[in-house]
Amino acid sequence: MKAMILAAGKGTRVRPLTYSVPKPMIPLIRKPVIESLIEHLKRYGIDEIVINTSHLAGSIENYLRDGDRFGVHIAYSFEGKMVNGVLVDEPLGSAGGIRKVQDFSGFFDDTFIVLCGDALIDLDIGRFLEFHRNNKALATIALKEVPRPEVSRYGVVQTDDNGRIVRFQEKPGIEEAVSTTVNTGVYLFEPEIIDLIPSGTEYDIAKDLFPLLIERGLPFCGASIPYQWVDIGSVADYWEATRLILTGKVDGYVVPGREIAAGVHAGIHLAANFGRITIVPPVYIGSGTRIGDDAVIIGPTVIGANCEIEGGATVRECIIGDYTRVRSVAEIERMIVFGEKCIEPTGRFLDIDEFEIGWIVDDVRKATELPASQRYLFELARELGH
Amino acid sequence: MEMDSRKAGDVLVVRLLVKRIDAATAMDFKGMMVDCINNGNLKIVLDLSAVDFVDSTGLGMIVATLKTLGSDGVMAICSPTEVVRSLFTLTRMNKLFDIVPTVEEAIAKVKG
């Protein structure tokens, strides 16, 4: 079976993380979501994968390359153009992207799987395929139950007793939702479905294609196979997913590095005197990081690679990106430091340069000296700390 | 710098009418606040509802105002925009000030 991973979205709901990386490349303790998806496909022998790219395409393409490293074959379908040496995004929508692939080479020649590139899944693809075939479906969605307050984030599905989808509502209001069963963005399609998608224009699977299937009464099914689905649809989701992984609540997700103490995983090449540092697990510390004496790190916390946590700093329940310096006066709590921004789990953020908060956190590769205005605040914070 | 000031009993309520307290406006801000203090206002409420950006110079000047006020005075901040509130929290400067959602609460705070 062949696969398509949808990776061309702008990821607007996950800003500001997606200003610097495309959504499928958001790292969950170092590993991009899309890498986990590819590993999952590989487990089921699916090794021909097309990924459509657009927003920050190079980031995905340069990381996954031709897939050799993962034991699969990967091709990219870029949706955009180059204007004056700059790539301009021209995403075609989820269905439009599939159509483009088919128009190019006729790639999809049998039942194929489509995954959104922004959620971790451990779906039993064998069972999913069996369901799809038993129902002789043209399209099958992997379904999941969610709490009612969350329905407005998803496509809501109503099925009949045979698993046939009779209604599909894209992001309905909580009141009008016909069920709490939602589309998880994992689909099995027959190649004939592509004939329903117009060429060269934006066309969405959920908004355009699914309503059409229902309208025409085509065999469109929903499979309720229990599985783990960790959706990264917002900054809050990313925050929660990282914490779930660190606390061991995502089955099968291995925290990288070596466990140097109970609940403390670390990479190599660390400059840290662990006898002089307070660490409350679960914590992950990336390779090449320096941690000064009397630093306090309270989990769930992820510290990226090549960071410097200065002596005296307190990092409590944070996700710290690579190459971050946390200054000695910092007491940061429930914060994501990523792409030169300090981001709260709600998505609200402060740009480190714009707000001149380099005296709290900055890039470790920048000079350590602070400008006078920041020095004043740094000294003040130091006095306050004593 | 544009600001509105009014007295609520012995409390001076200063509402900044600028969007930014940064290197360009901070000295002006400090000068006006020092004038207020020199005029005998020792209970001050700073209404930041219109301010959506404060850089390190601006933050420094807000703190410097508090220092000028000294131990005889008291200052509270009210109605900060979400991002300014985040700045105070991240930098722990919220330890120095009472920061409350409304003018009324701030007045009550400084009245003690």
Image: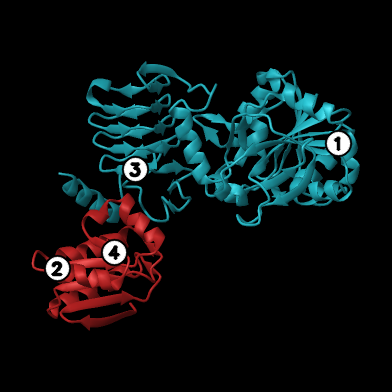
Chain colours: A cyan, B red
Q: CA distance from mark 4 to mark 1?
A: 58 Å
Q: Amino acid at mark 1?
A: Leu
The residue that label 4 is drawn on is B100
Q: Residue at point 66% right, 27% down?
A: A123
Q: Vertical placement of A143 versus B32: above or below?
A: above
Q: Nearer the viewer, mark 4 or mark 3?
A: 4
Q: Vertical placement of A17 versus B50: above or below?
A: above
Horizontal and vertical percent for residue A184? 67, 39
Task: Work out whether disc 1 and disc 3 sit on a shared chain.
Answer: yes
Q: Nearer the viewer, mark 4 or mark 1?
A: 1
Q: Amino acid at mark 4?
A: Val
Comparing B70 with A2, the one in front is: A2
Mark 1 vs mark 3: which is more N-terminal?
A: 1
Which image quarter is the N terminus of chain A in?
top right
Q: Vertical placement of A348 versus A321: above or below?
A: below
Q: Amino acid at mark 3?
A: Glu
Q: Nearer the viewer, mark 1 or mark 3?
A: 1
In the visual, does A303 lie left or right of A121? left
Q: Residue at point 30% right, 51% down?
A: B91
The residue that label 3 is drawn on is A333
Q: CA distance from mark 4 to mark 2?
A: 14 Å
Mark 1 element type: loop
Q: Is residue A91 visible?
A: no
Q: CA distance from mark 1 to mark 3?
A: 49 Å
Q: What is the quadrant of residue B98 in the picture?
A: bottom left
Residue A138 is marked as: 1
Residue B112 is marked as: 2
